[in-house]
Amino acid sequence: MDIYFEHTAPSIVVEIPEYKNGYIDIRKRGGRIRAFTEITNDNIHYCKELMKLVDELRHFNGVKGGIAVSESEYMATTLLEEAKPLTQVIFSSVKEVVEQGQYIFDTLWNTAIPAEQRIREIEEGVMPIRTRLLEKQDEIIKEINRLNNSADRLSICSAFGGMQMSYKYFFDSYKRIVERNKRIDNIGSGGNDDGLRWIINIGKDNLELAKIFLESGIQIRHIKNMPPMNFGVSEKEVALTIEKMEGDSVSQSFLISNEPLYVNHFNSLFEELWKNSVDAKDRIKAIEDGVDTEGIEIIQNPAEIQKITFDLVKSAAEEILIVLATANAFHRQEDLGAMQFLKEASNERDVKIRILTPADNLIVKTSQRLSEQQEQEQQSPKPQKINIHFIEPYLQTKVSLLIVDRKFSLAVELKDDAAHKSHEAMGLATYSNSKPTVFSYVSIFESLWKQTELYEGLQEIDKLKDEFINVAAHELRTPIQPILGVSGVLRSETKDSKQQELLDVIIRNAKRLQRLSQDILDVARIESHTLILKKEIFNLNDIISNGISDIMNQVIVKENKESSIKLEFTNSVKWKVDEDEEVNALPIVEADKDRISQVISNLLANAVKFTNEGAIRIAAEKNNGEILVSIKDTGTGIDPEILPRLFTKFVTKPETGGTGLGLFISKSIVESHGGKIWAENNTDGKGATFYFSLPLIR
């Protein structure tokens, strides 16, 4: 049988024979009885007798009424009078009711304490272990006074409001703790300077009150980052509130406990905070001398970060410097009204503002609109107060930065750039008013700002250069065509071999000049994103065959110059139709026929240029929905110094000649078709292989 009842019931069980004998009979039959009740000074005698009648007795505060539950029956009562039999009971043998009664009993049983412990507390005057939540102000003040008067040592951590409230209600009790500790110290009984210690964030607003507490003998230390609660802990008890206490008002939620685990935890917490805090005298002197000693603060709460951001902008008197990590970061701050705050700082306080941000079309338009507005408002050639420069992608960071008056900085980590709301995108923030830290950020900002100005200048130079090259290339083409035309006519009409050789030199060099001007124009088109593809469907094998035929003239010229040179071309293009059949035909591709022919010609010419003997082999194969073309030679291979930047502009060596534009153009053509191009030296140490891929139609 499991049973619980209020504090009057033990007398009923012990004094009334029917109940007492019933308990004895149960145990004689082998039954087991568990019981709990509220053990008090008044019923302690009966509880000791009851312990002889049951297998186990426990104590539970505030028990009302009673229930009894066995394997199959349930009984409850609300009327219990001392030493009198029950007059009313509720009885049930319904299974669900019995199970519910058992559940209620087990739940309360698990939180009850052994009767032996409670009896010892009453007889020896030991305070019971308990945790209470107080809500009435007079109860809270009474409990704090009791804790102060019973404590030999007290450690307090509170906000300024807690110190104000304590000064009004408890200051005398604090002074008594200090005096009591001094007396103990004087008679050599183990007193120390740790009688009353206080941790608080000391600022200008609570400076004078902190001095009063220091003068009374209370030890005080300053800490920047206060825990999110006020608490006081003695050697036996802890009292705490998570809500703030301001002025004369006391928080309505107040927890007090003598649970050893709580007491030990808050004593350990206080010791850790005390160890990492600053002596109040040093902090007060720093404030009075105007010396900044706060350094750096780490902030985790996004709402607090945003508040500090706006507070700093509002406080700016001379200058605001901003670096935004991404274009999205700019838009998020714009949505929160940051631009309006900046305009107010600029217009109302004459604050100069510079912003560095990655650009997108909307930000560019915002910048242009802002410039136009400022020009209209100023109506003078004065420098603009808000300037926006754009950071190139390679200069982007994962941190946004705010610097105000070169005195304060706030660096905010980017956690999720895809988030639409600012608080979801923010990570940790670092606030600082330390001069070395702030000046370091200023140096970083000025360096980035200077780079953007230089880059804008270079862009203007590049634009002028591109325009010049474009004009020059077109002007070059104008005389080249008649030179080739007239030279060709003269070559066909003259019979003199010497004159023919001279005309061949003119024609050959005119063609070189023609190719150079075409390459320059192609590069200009590529960099201005105006390279237009005229796609058509064709058989790639025809282009490869034509490319080999065209390059043979170059090989003949080369072999005539150096009789030892001998090159062979192999077109081993095979297309795998299925696992058992191969045919000498490539599948159809859709591309710009002339541009792909240009790529093949460039790669073949490159192979011939660096190969004096051996063979040049062209192959193609299907590879995951693409056609992969390779051109392999047995030449000198690719210089390891050049290989990493092989497909960039003007990559060549003086001894090999050439402009270094062919591979750059080839790469742009292939990639504009959705393909890839790359190269590597052959594993046998002889020559190199160039590859490019194109998407297939079939």
Image (tube, grey):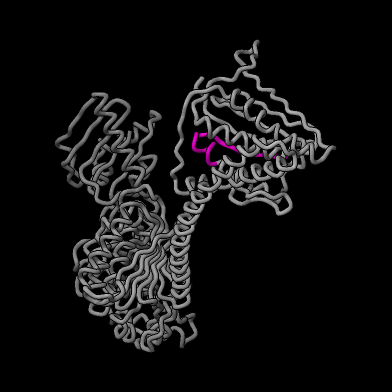
User: Residue 40's image quarter?
Assistant: bottom left
Q: Is residue 611 left or right of residue 176?
A: right
Q: Is residue 233 visible?
A: no
Q: Which residue is more in the foreground, 517 or 658? A: 517
Q: Is residue 259 left or right of residue 65?
A: right
Residue at 20% in and 43% down: 65
Question: Where 640 falls versus 239 (above or below)?
Answer: above
Q: Which residue is more in the foreground, 137 or 569? A: 569
Q: Please state the horizontal and vertical placement of residue 584, each as a whole percent of the image.
A: 64, 16
Q: Is residue 643 left or right of residue 40?
A: right
Question: Where 404 falls versus 50 (above or below)?
Answer: below
Q: Please state the horizontal and vertical placement of residue 581, each as a whole percent of the image.
A: 64, 11
Q: Is residue 287 visible?
A: yes
User: Residue 78's image quarter?
Assistant: top left
Q: Please state the horizontal and vertical placement of residue 458, each as a whole percent of the image.
A: 48, 62
Q: Which residue is more in the foreground, 148 or 377? A: 377
Q: Which residue is more in the foreground, 678 or 19? A: 678
Residue at 19% in and 67% down: 137
Q: Where does the magenta region start and end?
A: 668-681
